Image (cartoon, rainbow, N blue to C red):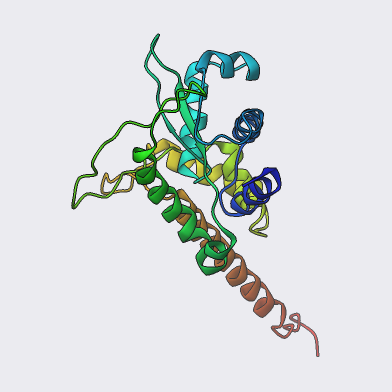
Amino acid sequence: MNYIELINQFWRIRRYKPLTAYEADLYYYLMQECNNRKWLNPFNLSTNLICAELGIARKTLSDLRNRLKQKGLIDFVEGQKNKSNAVYKLIYVTEGNIQGNELGNIQGNHLNTKHKLNNIPPNPQQGEIGFPSEKPKRGRKPKVEFIPPTIEEVQSYFQSSGLPAWEIQAEKFFNHWNSQGWKKGTGAKITNWDSLANNWILTEKEKGEKDARSNGNLGSLPEQPAYGED
């Protein structure tokens, strides 16, 4: 694992899961910190230091790293106040897995890595802490917390769809689901906003094609002679 491999992976994932400038900033910062430690991975890092370096609040940092974790780029364990720093791990998906099933393996590799991290021992020479040992419960799948997208993420997704007036449709989509609290009509929480966006885009494209056919049929009707003409 090196800079080039991580950067290439970053852009592959970004094609399917748009990232904000703040998310990219945090990810590249973590890469630099890992490099400074001669690619020791995982590594611990002070939350106060990250906030000071990037000029962000603790709440913002918490949201950003949860988004990066959800997108399969990092994993982390929260530190204990005044006792230990948070531990971060940069996740790298091998090229073979990507060719087999790019999106599915990004998520699968992220979940498998989470279990492997439990067996990492402390490293007293580097001052690093290991991940807590915890036996996974049988019959339960790890839950990934859904984080609602920002308007910028939705706009970026719609822009790449080729949909006419994508800016207007992106705003309509965001406002609609945001007003619903990102819940379905049954009250169930949304787990994947990308699929909702795809359905929205396909529906709008079908409407546009239908309108185009209707306008074309009307334009092909023969002209009716005016009253009083021969």
Name the quarter where the C terminus is drawn.
bottom right
Q: Residue furthest right?
A: 230
Q: Residue furthest front?
A: 125
Q: Position of residue 72 (x, y in %)?
A: 49, 46
Residue 111, image x and y in percent?
Answer: 39, 49
Q: Who is closer to the viewer here, 178 or 194?
A: 194
Q: Name which quarter of the figure residue 164 lies in.
A: bottom right
Looking at the picture, how far across and down is residue 171, in whole percent? 57, 42
The relative height of residue 128 versus residue 83 in the rendered view (above or below) is: below
The percent position of residue 84, horizontal first and vertical second, equals 41, 16
Could you tell me which residue is drawn at 69 percent across and 43 percent down?
Answer: 3
The residue positioned 61% from the left and 47% from the top of the image is 1
| Front-lying residue, 105 or 61 | 105
Q: Nearer the viewer, residue 19 or 11?
A: 11
Could you say which quadrant of the image residue 150 lies in? top right
Picture layout, residue 180 above or below residue 220: above
Residue at the limit of the structure toward the bottom, as seen here = 230
How many discs mark residues in the rendered view? 0
Q: Residue at x 52, y 17 (%)?
A: 46
Q: Residue at x 66, y 45 (%)?
A: 2
